[in-house]
Amino acid sequence: MKKTLLSLLTAGALLTGVTTAGAAELTQKDDIKVAMMPNYPPLEFKDPATGQLTGMDYDLGMEIGKRLNRKISWQEIGFEQMVNAVATKRIDMILSGMTDTKARQPVATFVDYYHSGPQFYTTVAHNEINQMLDLCGKKVGTSRRTTFPAEIAAWSKANCEAAGKPAIVVVGAEGTADARTQLRQGRIEGAVQGSETLPYIMNMEKDTFKPLGKAFAYQVTGIGIAKDDTPLIDGVKSALTAMIADGTYMKILTKWGMQDGAITKVTINSGK
């Protein structure tokens, strides 16, 4: 059986750019266990009609698995537990819209595949809030498990305080869906989530939300892999590189309306 798998993987390596040596080591994995928290459409979520996983990250992961001739085994894990799970080998990689940051790089290696940034938004009912500075002194919610709380505080210091306005009050939410719920209920006046996700949310809940300005920070989204798993790091990088070259990568992003954050070259640990 292993000989058959090795033959398939070696043949696939000719298409993906994975080296034969890397292909041989990858055969040690019956499947690739991938962490995902499906609460961040359109990157990852469950189809309301079927309950099945879907989204941009899901499509990218399945295509990577196909090119490596490995089954992708999706594992639903809390976002805050993912880095530790990959470091302790409970999972093989993270593909869940995770930002590649310097703080995370000592624990995991990130194969970077997308550009994005945090963006403020509010509800259309807030007629008094029409620009980012209108949020100064107001409560703004975001997922506490992301880098967004620190980025909001930094933006507030550089803009609200510099303009002599009160600082934004950052409210930590359980996730972006929770932040939107709090915003609808009037418990907060604004919210922040990835700029790449807002068009999808606004389309799903028409006439409910309005964006404020553009993304106010630059982020690199990466696939997190254990630092010593060189074959998987090299395999994923090669697969993504081939997907960019043959147009598959852009086709997947376009399907989900996320082509604005496309990369042209796969990098490793390029996050700040």
Image (cartoon, rainbow, N blue to C red):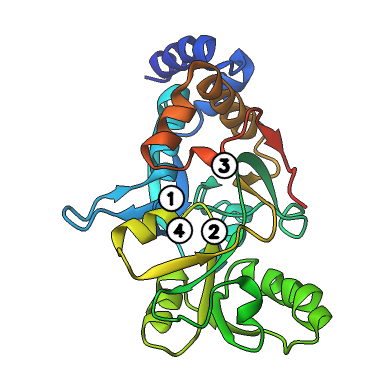
Circle 2 residues within 10 Å: few <14, some 14–19, many ≥20: some
Instruction: Point out the residue furthest to the left here.
Output: 49
Circle 1 residues within 10 Å: few <14, some 14–19, many ≥20: many
Q: Mark 3: which amino acid?
A: Gly
Measured Cα–Cα span from mark 4 to mark 2: 7 Å
Circle 3 residues within 10 Å: few <14, some 14–19, many ≥20: some
**Does the rendering let one see residue 13?**
yes
Residue 61, x across and y down, in percent: 44, 38
Residue with the mark numbered 2: 194
Query: First in sequence: mark 3 or mark 1?
Result: 1
Left or right of 67? Residue 86 is right
Residue 14, x across and y down, in percent: 53, 9
Measured Cα–Cα span from mark 3 to mark 2: 11 Å
Q: Is mark 4 in CB contact (under 8 Å) with mark 2?
A: yes
* Numbered label attached to residue 43: 1
Measured Cα–Cα span from mark 4 to mark 1: 11 Å
Left or right of 120? Residue 12 is left
Question: Nearer the observer, disc 2 or disc 1?
Answer: 2
In the picture, the quarter occupied by the N terminus is top left
- Residue sitting nearer the eye, 30 or 182: 182
Query: First in sequence: mark 2 or mark 1?
Result: 1
* Numbered label attached to residue 198: 4
Query: First in sequence: mark 4 or mark 1?
Result: 1
The answer to whether 231 is drawn above or below residue 143 in the figure is above
Label 4 element class: helix
Residue with the mark numbered 3: 261
Determine the residue positioned at 40% across, 74% down. Answer: 124
Measured Cα–Cα span from mark 3 to mark 1: 12 Å
